[in-house]
Amino acid sequence: MPITFKALGRKTVQNILAVAATIAVAGILSVGHAHAAPKLLQKFNAWSAYVNEDGAQKLCFVISQPTSSEMNPAGRNRGPGYFFISYRPAENVTGEVSAAFGYPLSANSTRAQIGNTNFPLFARDETAWIENAADEPRLVEAMKAGASMRIFGRSTRGTTTVDTYSLSGVTAAINRVAQECG
């Protein structure tokens, strides 16, 4: 039975966003007393590898923030952007990609681009996932081979953004979480 990334991805990203927000705001790895605190496994240039174990559930992920962002019109408010690759062994999820934009997204407005290759993303609320699950391994492999990735989005108010991510360290970070959650 195929995995429904729309359903699985939202739960994962909500958990990761809680972690990422804590990291960004407080610099402390915690999502509250109801969950185990994620543990930094290692930082690899622009990417960090984490594991979070909560009882029998284990979640590993790599995360990065944009190295630059362009916004049109300039000066609009938005939360921080993040890009994730998640691994949940108990659910047989390996290499699930998602992007947090920091603002509500318009439908059919998001895509990832590495070199000249585009990967359509679907948006829900402030998060986007790969449109076609069969393209997910191709995107991860392109990330490993690339130098940078651009993520395009448009808010529900019409603001467009382009977040540029360095891919330096992504392969090492993925390999590290694969050791932990593989």
Image (cartoon, helix red, strand yellow):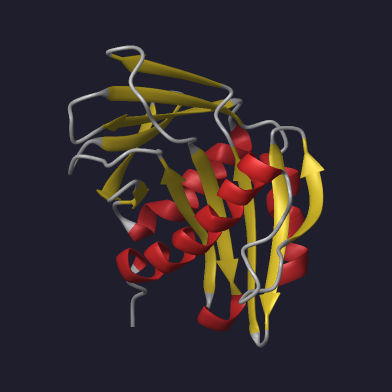
Looking at the image, which residue is at 69% across and 31% down?
Answer: 168
- Left or right: residue 117 versus residue 149 is left
The picture quadrant where one finds residue 74 is: top left
Residue 129 in picture, x, y percent from top left: 36, 52
Q: Closest to the observer: 168 or 20?
A: 20
Q: Closest to the observer: 41 or 125?
A: 125
Q: Is residue 182 visible?
A: no
Residue 43 sits above or below residue 65 on the image? below
- Left or right: residue 127 versus residue 94 is left
Q: Is residue 179 visible?
A: yes
Looking at the image, which residue is at 18% across and 36% down?
Answer: 156
Residue 92 in picture, x, y percent from top left: 53, 77
Looking at the image, which residue is at 34% across and 46% down?
Answer: 126
- Left or right: residue 101 versus residue 182 is left
Residue 111 sits above or below residue 57 on the image? above
The picture quadrant where one finds residue 9 is: bottom left
